[in-house]
Amino acid sequence: MPAPAAWLRSTWSTDPYSFGAISYLPAGTDPQQRAALAEPVDDRLFFAGEALDDTRPGTVLGAVDSGRSAALALIMAATGQERVAVIGAGASGVVAGRLLADAGHDVTIFEARDRSGGRILSRTADEWPIPAQLGAWLISAEQLAALKGRLTALGEQQLAFETTTGWSQDGATDAPSGEAIAQAVEHAKELPADVPLSEALEQDGADPSDPALAAALAWLAATTAADPQKASSWYPPTPPEDGLAGMAEDLGEFFDEHLQDLEITLASPVVRVAYDDSGVSLRLGTGEALSFDRVVVTAPLGVLQQQGIEFAPALPFSHRGAIAALASGFIETVWMRFDEPFWEADEAVWHVVGGDGAIRTWINLHPATGEPVLVGIVGGPQAEQFAGLSDHDAQVAARASLALFAPASADES
Ligand SMILES: Cc1cc2nc3c(=O)[nH]c(=O)nc-3n(C[C@H](O)[C@H](O)[C@H](O)COP(=O)(O)OP(=O)(O)OC[C@H]3O[C@@H](n4cnc5c(N)ncnc54)[C@H](O)[C@@H]3O)c2cc1C
């Protein structure tokens, strides 16, 4: 396998300001938990983020809609012009901050990282034909249309990924179909209790060692972060619809545009939120304390689960229950640029069928850009393991995952 001329990787699983990629419902929970977390607390704390949206959780669109809902609820509760803090400058926090400022409130956004965007992260450099997207960037035509209705500047340039193939030791094969999963989910509705997806599949007679099923589950995990051994079969994760495209612009510019004239404090993690009838006090990592009338909290579910922010008094039981009940799943991405294409597959989306490669979903940017760039996506527990590897070992694992695509005569290096 040739060594890449350039490469980048994400580590969302271990990042203390995300601790995961996307929320999902484990067996035994239901979407009410998302709604419970979205309930305002004493009309002082308003929660938002992808995990709280029950229509399109785990997506940029869901995060945006959740930010809008929280901002509108706060506007209804406010009496006159108020001082409002927003914790987090991801899609949800930026949209909430913008709406609140436009409604006349005095808004300050506190962002732990030294950049805005949260789980959307574009890296621009000469070696990449489009900005390397280490977080969200894949979107269906339907979701893009909905997003553009809310945020005109997002997703102006896209690459369409219209062709897909499976690839096994013997070369091209059928792309995995989600049929077995859909059928097991349908039959799981008849069961007396919710069971994890993997159990629903087994009860339905599916063979867990079938390479095609493993490839279908790898795609599900790569796009939804859900662990099939834990995810609910009654409220299953849903992979993106057909007509998948990749956002091909610097998404950071979109955030900059939305943040114009908003007060934002970067590199300022909020470590404590104290609230009572009269207002909210935030303590930053620096020890500084600041007072506000109300706050919108958009810190990811993973951060809330790891108690990255202390609440005083403790959150209501229903909120703590929801935080514990929902799951934060994992996705990691690698971008690899090669000197020249070494692969035979012409399709845009590749699914590895069989073998034990760490990364089983690849996007081939060569057809769309003419440049030899491959993007690997791994989800679920495999993503968490991958995030734990050193850079050297992660690159070795990523290259090994591509071995099937190289002709047998390709040089070893
Ligand atoms: C690898 C990956 C791939 C994805 N792929 C897609 C995709 O293709 N399509 C899609 O629609 N969605 C995708 N998603 C999901 C999408 O990125 C999220 O749903 C969305 O961006 C979440 O926005 P948010 O505002 O809810 O949270 P975030 O973007 O996480 O924003 C929360 C912000 O809070 C900040 N923060 C955390 N703790 C603190 C603190 N204590 N104090 C202050 N600030 C804090 C964080 O730094 C962050 O900026 C993907 C996610 C990942 C990780």
Image (cartoon, rainbow, N blue to C red):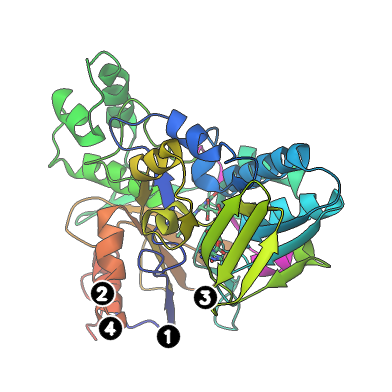
**Discs 4, 2 touching: Cβ within 8 Å:** no
Tell me the distance, in whole angstroms, between the alpha carbons under discs 4 and 2.
8 Å
User: Of the residues tagged 4 and 2, which is closer to the observer?
Assistant: 2
Circle 3: is it few (<14), some (14-19), or many (20+) Cα within 10 Å? Answer: some
| Relative to 5, residue 14 above or below | above
First to last magenta residue range = 241-256
Question: Residue 366 appears at what percent x and percent y?
Answer: 50, 66
Residue beneath label 2, please? 389
Question: Residue 378 appears at what percent x and percent y?
Answer: 34, 58
Q: Residue at x 23, y 71 (%)?
A: 400
Q: Residue at x 76, y 65 (%)?
A: 259
Question: Residue 128 appears at what percent x and percent y?
Answer: 56, 76
Q: Residue at x 70, y 51 (%)?
A: 96
Q: Is mark 3 within 8 Å of ligand 1?
A: yes
Tell me the distance, in whole angstroms, between the alpha carbons under discs 2 and 1.
20 Å
Residue beneath label 3, please? 285
User: Of the residues tagged 4 and 3, which is closer to the observer?
Assistant: 3
Question: Quarter-wise, where is residue 327 in the image?
Answer: top left
User: Of the residues tagged 2 and 3, which is closer to the observer?
Assistant: 3
Give the amino acid at mark 4.
His
Mark 2: secondary structure: loop
Circle 2: is it few (<14), some (14-19), or many (20+) Cα within 10 Å? Answer: some
